[in-house]
Image: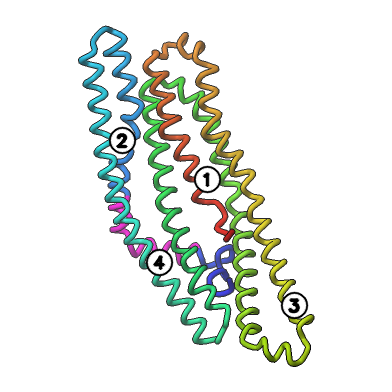
């Protein structure tokens, strides 16, 4: 999309994006504060059950165990409240972003008379708006969830980090390696989409003239080329789903297998049964969903 994708992978986008965020630093502070509240929920989701087992149920003290589970439940409620407040803060970022995009696309359309601006103003602005909101929400959630889970693992037993940390880091690294190629293919798809929209905007009002002049074959060939170009761009975009699945398997699912496989070694190195259960809770209830959501949110935004 020439108006909206001139700069995604060229110079200028980073500086404009940074200025946009710095102008809304109060919103970012609120977003960070409510995200910290969510981090507390993540921390307790593994730490609470671990203490409930080690200090309560496994020692024949069910009251202590139930108390720790109650603390965990309160943490979940507090985290849910924080999540609700996060949505309001994200909206304060997303709506000005959408307004700025609409202003740029309309200005270009009025200035140049570009028929492809219709595609930019409708489908592509909404794609950009929804994508930006999703990326802010999910990226923020992943960072704070991972921080809370890793802090909890370290608090329970540092050896747990040796099992969970490396595959998580490898999965995130593989995921990050796909971002730049994906951005290029996303841009190519949007450019092809706008080219097709502009072509159809010029051809469709003149179909009677096309028929009268016998130019059907020529017009059909030109339209077909643009359709094929968009199809190729969409397929190239979709192929990057493969490394995304691999990054999820490495970063989110492999730690579960490693925790189970190394359980005897961990128990022999002063890791308590409760800590092992807490580590599994961190991975299955926090890290795996966060990795899956991150991978989905950064997936290619191509129409079916």
Q: Of residues 152 and 59, which is closer to you in this image?
A: 59
Separation of marks 1 and 4 at Cα, in angstroms: 23 Å
Which element carries disc 2, helix, strand or loop? Answer: helix
Q: Earlier in the sequence, mark 2 or mark 3?
A: 2
Placement of 83 over or under 263, stated as above or below: below
Q: Residues within 10 Å of mark 3 (few under 14, many from 20)?
A: few
Is 26 inside the magenta-drawn segment? yes
- Please identify the dominant SS of the magenta region: helix
Q: Is residue 301 left or right of residue 140?
A: right
Residue drawn at the location 50% of the way across and 30% of the way down: 165
What residue is shown with label 2?
41
Instruction: Give the structural element (helix, strand or loop) at label 3.
Output: helix
Mark 2 or mark 4, which is nearer the start of the sequence? 2
Determine the CA span between mark 3 and mark 4. 38 Å
In this rendering, the answer to whether 293 lies above or below 136 is: above
Coordinates of residue 90 in the picture (x, y in percent): 34, 56
| Residue underneath mark 3 | 220
Which image quarter is the C terminus in?
A: bottom right
Q: Is residue 241 magenta?
A: no
Residue at x-position 48% and y-position 45% = 294
In this view of the protein, which residue sits in the foreground, 135 or 156?
135
Mark number displayed over residue 295 = 1
Q: Secondary structure at mark 1?
A: helix
């Amino acid at each position: 999309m020439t108006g909206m994708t001139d700069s995604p992978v060229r110079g200028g986008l980073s500086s404009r994006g940074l200025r946009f965020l710095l102008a809304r630093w109060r919103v970012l502070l609120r977003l960070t504060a409510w995200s910290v509240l969510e981090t507390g929920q993540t921390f307790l989701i593994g730490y609470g059950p671990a203490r409930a087992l080690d200090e309560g149920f496994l020692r024949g003290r069910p009251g202590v165990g139930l108390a720790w589970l109650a603390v965990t439940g309160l943490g979940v409620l507090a985290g849910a409240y924080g999540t609700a407040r996060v949505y309001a803060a994200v909206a304060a970022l997303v709506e000005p972003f959408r307004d700025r995009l609409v202003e740029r696309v309309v200005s270009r359309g009025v200035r140049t008379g570009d028929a492809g601006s219709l595609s930019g103003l409708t489908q592509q602005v909404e794609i950009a708006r929804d994508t930006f909101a999703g990326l802010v929400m999910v990226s923020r959630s992943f960072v704070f969830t991972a921080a809370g889970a890793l802090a909890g693992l370290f608090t329970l037993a540092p050896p747990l980090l040796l099992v969970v940390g490396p595959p998580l880091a490898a999965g995130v690294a593989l995921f990050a390696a796909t971002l730049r190629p994906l951005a290029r293919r996303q841009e190519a798809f949007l450019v092809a989409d706008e080219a097709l929209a502009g072509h159809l905007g010029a051809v469709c009002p003149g179909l009677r003239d096309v028929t009268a002049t016998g130019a059907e074959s020529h017009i059909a060939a030109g339209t077909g080329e643009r359709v094929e170009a968009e199809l190729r761009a969409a397929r190239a975009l979709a192929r990057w789903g493969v490394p995304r699945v691999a990054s999820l398997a490495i970063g989110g699912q492999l730690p579960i297998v490693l925790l189970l496989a190394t359980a005897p070694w961990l128990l022999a190195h002063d890791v308590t049964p409760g800590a092992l259960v807490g580590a599994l809770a961190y991975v299955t209830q926090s890290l795996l969903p966060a990795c899956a959501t991150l991978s989905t949110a950064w997936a290619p935004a191509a129409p079916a």
